[in-house]
Image (cartoon, coloured by chain):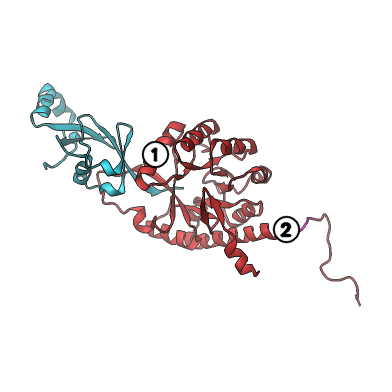
Chain colours: A cyan, B red
Amino acid sequence: MQRLGPASSLNRLERASLGSYWLAAMSLDRSLGIRVNGEHRRVPGGVSIAEMLNEIGIDPTKVAVERNLAIVARSTLGDIRVEDGDDFEIVHFVGGG
Amino acid sequence: MTAQQDIKADTWTVAGRTFTSRLIVGTGKYKSLEENAAAVEASGAEIVTVAVRRVNISDPTQPRLSDFIDPAKVTYLPNTAGCFTAEEAIRTLRLAREAGGWNLVKLEVLGEAKTLYPDMRETLKAAEALAKEGFEPMVYCVDDPIAAKQLEEAGAVAIMPLGAPIGSGLGLQNLVTIRLIVEGANVPVLVDAGVGTASDAAEAMELGCDGVLMNTAIAEAKDPVLMARAMKAAVEAGRLAYLAGRMQKRRYADPSSPLAGLI
């Protein structure tokens, strides 16, 4: 699996100059543009949610996942493929009162 | 029966789960997870509140709360702190349920940042929706006996009125309303928020509350672990005093030594 990097590694100028070329490149390498906890990321096409989490360094058994505002059952994280444009919230428990 | 046996038998039950400790502690504001764990241990709490937050995806290897406070030994009570609408609170608790499988949750819907006072309209809406989804919400609320009744009707499994604003440490501001809530409730009543020191916790228990929930009073004490011990003792003392039934107050003195046989 190719290394994932935040799409934000491009600066604003680079994004602007790439323009439509960038959009074309997206489909050429079949990678997907997604958001994870508000941050833009690119992942290879065809990965499951569990694979996406592992790649980021998150243990899928220790978090809860919301995709486009709907809860994804933990038991199905390995079966569901990431789609282009998906918006994920990955949460866990922290100290609180 | 000895006093020791009485204490052991004195349990309380919320949504079918029975606990011995009547002190619920928060896990926020501690200097370290180690200190947090030591304070929980010293408090004797069997339930801790936790918040639901985004995983830090730039550094997912940061130490986790569950590495220090074992959810298999202490019941995690996920909260909705920071939620200002019913919708946000419900969304948060659905995630909490997926993260840990808990139905027993703490609902709080806040009205404004300055006072962190509950928004009761949104709180009632959320409590009703959550109960319909199979949650068992313990609900942070205003110290209003009518609102407490309405929450119970909406499906709250515990009523948790504030003693004073969250994190203020001002102590119980309205003993009358807390007592009225206790007298009218058919579910456990816990004072949630406002406790500043041990006597505040004892006072809540003396009113007949089933328990007390606190965070800042322990976490912001100079020695949080020692304060956790103090709170454990205070909750137990207040509970015992409530069970023992206090003496009537008199307006004037009444000698404790016999008047007969004076030389």
Task: State whether residue B23 is above or below residue B6.
Answer: above
**Labelled disc at residue B94:** 1
Residue A39 in the image: state x and y as whole percent: 25, 35
Residue B85 showing in the rendered view: no
Residue at image x 53%, y 33%?
B124
Does dot 2 land on a helix, a strand or a loop?
loop
Residue B251 placement: quadrant: bottom right
Left or right side of B48 for A28: left
Residue at image x 61%, y 69%?
B4
Task: State whether residue A2 is above or below residue B19.
Answer: above
The quarter of the image holding the N terminus of chain B is bottom right
Q: Residues within 10 Å of mark 2 (few under 14, many from 20)?
A: few
Tell which residue pokes out farthest to the top in this image. Answer: A20
Q: Which residues are magenta?
A: B245-249
Residue at image x 63%, y 38%?
B144
The quarter of the image holding the C terminus of chain B is bottom right
Q: Look at mark 2 in the image and give the residue it sits on.
A: B246
Q: Residue B88 lies in magenta, yes or no?
A: no
Asked if disc 1 and disc 2 are in contact, CB closer than 8 Å, the reply is: no
Residue B216 in the image: state x and y as whole percent: 50, 51
Mark in front: 1 vs 2: 1
Name the residue nearer the viewer: A43 or A70.
A70
Tell which residue pokes out farthest to the bottom in this image. Answer: B263
**Labelled disc at residue B196:** none
Q: Amino acid at mark 2?
A: Arg
Name the residue nearer the viewer: B133 or A93.
B133
Residue at image x 26%, y 41%?
A76
Residue B140 in the image: state x and y as whole percent: 53, 42
Q: Residues within 10 Å of mark 1 (few under 14, many from 20)?
A: many
